[in-house]
Image (cartoon, grey):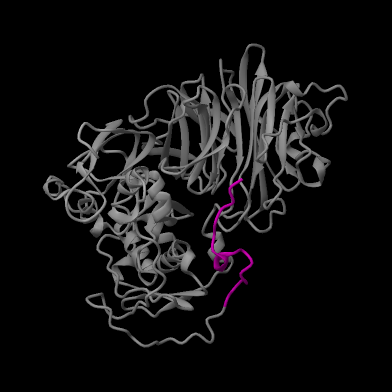
């Protein structure tokens, strides 16, 4: 199982309240050319750039290298592609500066001898993933071609192959394999519109970029704004903000200088917070891969302020599990349904022998259930535990919700019956609302103690009936399955109201997707039908560029999928459970079926084929 890669410098074991003592306020300035002043950047490690035309010993390797040619620093992309072409073909490439790279997933490559001796015809079958821009963000695909052809041959002059006829002249193609090899995935952060939590935004940094300049690039990305699909769901850094210096790196303390407009209050939400503090935490989280200690923020006309990796730093990111929740680490609490009742699974802490959460223990609560969602969140009054249960009532289904703070239990509130209700999910930060699919068609909102449903209007980009929904830990992004495809959306919160913003289709080769859940800040897990017509479970980035198979043959249509999200400062492995008709799985890499003895507190003669709807208690 893949483990999330994070730098040791950002590990959760960092001491609370790191001091800036011993770090000099001034360091020698080194001239790096026409960069903003003051400031400096030290040259860091430079990683591998894409291969040159003569690097491949085989024709297959040449094709792979050609599809990697534009990878790396954006200003070199066009020339690198032209270097692979014959002189007569080079000027045919007409790509505007800043047009971006068209990322494609190659599904099949055919190389055949062409009529001309020593020449080859290459046919690529591809999926269009999206356009990688200069800010490292992959936006929606601009092309719809699924097949490309081009020819390769040798010409007089330098030894080796050349592309004699390119696959396209008005776009630069780069493969997802090249993206994996020549870029490093990064996460930058923007504040939610209500200024209560940071929201992740996935980016890609070219490996060949001088390491000393990468933190400065990240600051520039933040100033230029979020990815397009997050617009309206996050707060952008004020328009007109300018960077006053390069970020010195490597250095014990990162120093960021911005113009005064960066902290000007422009919305009612900003009047409730310290804008300089918010910028500090936003920068620290976005620059975390480069953070060795503190961050010093300098705003024109204000005294500088130093930020530490302390409790306030971690509290700014709702995806970071609260430290006081004891079960928020390696072993989450696991549950499943059997005969309409919730049972702990043996894989829970303590072997699953602990009592069920108090909210489930009242008379009549834990019976006739078909799905459930349990979550908890730390708040001013203590740790809040919330439950959303779907109960079968004759031939119809009813949602019941409620919450518990400590031992102060409240009765569950029941909504009206519907012909069909999907798996409910909780929106966190704050955990005052949830979402559920009704009648396998529309998305509805409920609140922490009211099961009355209100329709959530989705953007027109979503095509088809909605059949499943999942929410990220920050509570400002959701994923929905509609028409057998997966979309991600930014949402804004106003009290218990939920407003869905722009939608982005997640490009994937899986068809007939039935289930989705979030596995970490910028990844989801989905279940659907693969090219071999078998149901598979895959984990992938929100932009679809990076995907990894979790289960190659699920054995049937996946009806329930549950993932315990990885903490952004953790190296824990992704935890996946799912169910299909006749079996449920607690998946740790060996596709292990949940057996009868793993369902704690069930009757002795349990039939494991009737275990359904596994889920985690989400911290």
Left or right: where does residue 320 sit relative to residue 113? right
Q: Quick one: 566 or 298, which is closer to the camera?
A: 566
Q: Residue at x 72, y 35 (%)?
A: 335
Q: Is residue 197 magenta?
A: no
Q: Is residue 608 above or below residue 323?
A: above
Name the main secondary structure of what is drawn in magenta. Answer: loop
- Quadrant where the N terminus lies? top right
Q: Is residue 221 above or below residue 27?
A: above
Q: Is residue 8 magenta?
A: yes
Residue 376 image point, x, y percent: 65, 46
Q: Residue furthest top?
A: 395
> Which contiguous range is marked in magenta?
1-18
Q: Residue at x 51, y 73 (%)?
A: 292
Residue 321 image point, x, y percent: 61, 54
Left or right: where does residue 528 sit relative to residue 351? left
**Does the rendering let one see residue 228?**
no
Q: Quick one: 172 or 31, which is closer to the camera?
A: 172
Q: Residue at x 51, y 49 (%)?
A: 521
Quadrant of the image occupied by residue 183: bottom left
Left or right: where does residue 293 sit relative to residue 395? left
Circle count:
0
Quadrant of the image occupied by residue 106: top left
Q: Residue furthest front?
A: 117
Q: Quick one: 562 or 312, which is closer to the camera?
A: 562
**Does the rendering let one see residue 596?**
yes
Left or right: where does residue 389 sit relative to residue 150? right
Residue 461 image point, x, y percent: 33, 31
Q: Residue at x 28, y 65 (%)?
A: 241
Residue 377 image point, x, y percent: 62, 49
């Amino acid at each position: 199982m893949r483990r999330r890669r994070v730098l040791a410098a950002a590990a959760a074991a960092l001491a609370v309240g790191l001091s800036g003592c011993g770090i000099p306020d001034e360091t020698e300035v080194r001239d790096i050319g026409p960069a903003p002043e003051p400031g400096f950047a030290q040259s860091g490690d430079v990683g591998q750039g894409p291969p040159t035309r003569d690097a491949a010993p085989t024709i297959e390797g040449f094709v792979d290298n050609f599809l990697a040619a534009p990878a790396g620093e954006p200003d070199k992309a066009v020339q690198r592609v032209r270097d692979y072409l014959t002189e007569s073909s080079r000027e045919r490439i007409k790509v505007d500066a800043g047009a971006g790279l068209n990322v494609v997933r190659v599904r099949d490559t055919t190389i055949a001898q062409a009529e001309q001796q020593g020449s080859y015809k290459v046919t690529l079958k591809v999926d269009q993933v999206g356009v990688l821009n200069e800010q490292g963000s992959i936006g929606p695909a601009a092309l719809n071609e699924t097949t490309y052809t081009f020819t390769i041959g040798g010409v007089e002059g330098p030894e080796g192959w050349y592309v004699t006829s390119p696959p396209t002249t008005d776009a630069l193609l780069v493969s997802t394999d090249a993206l994996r090899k020549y870029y490093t995935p990064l996460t930058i952060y923007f504040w939610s519109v209500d200024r209560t939590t940071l929201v992740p935004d996935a980016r890609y940094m070219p490996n060949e970029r001088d390491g000393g300049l990468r933190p400065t690039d990240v600051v520039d990305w933040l100033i230029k704004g979020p990815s397009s699909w997050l617009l309206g769901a996050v707060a952008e850094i004020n328009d007109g903000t300018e960077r006053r210096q390069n970020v010195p790196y490597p250095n014990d303390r990162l120093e960021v200088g911005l113009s005064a407009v960066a902290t000007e209050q422009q919305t009612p939400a900003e009047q409730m917070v310290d804008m300089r503090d918010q910028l500090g935490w936003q920068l620290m989280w976005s620059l975390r891969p480069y953070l060795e200690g503190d961050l010093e923020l300098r705003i024109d006309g204000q005294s500088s302020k130093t930020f530490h990796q302390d409790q306030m730093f971690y509290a700014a990111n709702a995806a970071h599990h609260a430290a006081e929740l004891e079960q928020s680490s390696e072993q989450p609490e696991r549950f499943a349904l059997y005969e309409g009742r919730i049972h702990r699974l043996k894989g829970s802490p303590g072997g699953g022998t602990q009592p069920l959460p108090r909210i489930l223990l009242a008379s009549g609560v834990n019976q006739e259930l078909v799905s459930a969602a349990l979550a908890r969140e730390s708040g001013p009054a203590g740790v809040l535990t919330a439950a959303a249960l779907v109960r079968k009532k004759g031939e119809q289904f009813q949602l019941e919700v409620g919450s518990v703070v400590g031992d102060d239990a409240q009765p569950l509130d029941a909504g009206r019956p519907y012909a069909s209700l999907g798996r409910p999910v909780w929106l966190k930060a704050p955990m005052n609302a949830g979402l559920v699919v009704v009648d396998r068609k529309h998305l509805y909102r409920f609140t922490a103690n009211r099961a009355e449903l209100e329709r959530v209007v989705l953007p027109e980009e979503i095509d088809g009936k909605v059949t499943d929904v999942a929410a990220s830990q920050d509570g400002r992004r959701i994923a929905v399955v509609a028409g057998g495809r997966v979309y991600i959306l930014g949402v804004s919160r106003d009290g218990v109201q939920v407003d869905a913003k722009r939608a982005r289709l997640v490009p994937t080769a899986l068809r007939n997707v039935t289930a989705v859940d979030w596995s970490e800040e910028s990844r989801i897990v989905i279940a659907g039908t693969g090219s071999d017509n078998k149901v598979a479970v895959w984990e992938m980035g929100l932009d679809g560029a990076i995907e990894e198979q979790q289960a190659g043959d699920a054995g049937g249509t996946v009806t329930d999928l549950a993932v315990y999200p990885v903490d952004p400062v953790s190296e824990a492995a992704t935890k996946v459970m799912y169910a299909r008709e006749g079996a449920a799985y607690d998946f740790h890499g060996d596709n292990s079926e949940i057996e009868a003895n793993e369902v704690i507190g069930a009757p002795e003669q349990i039939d494991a084929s009737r275990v359904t709807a596994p889920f985690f208690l989400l911290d």
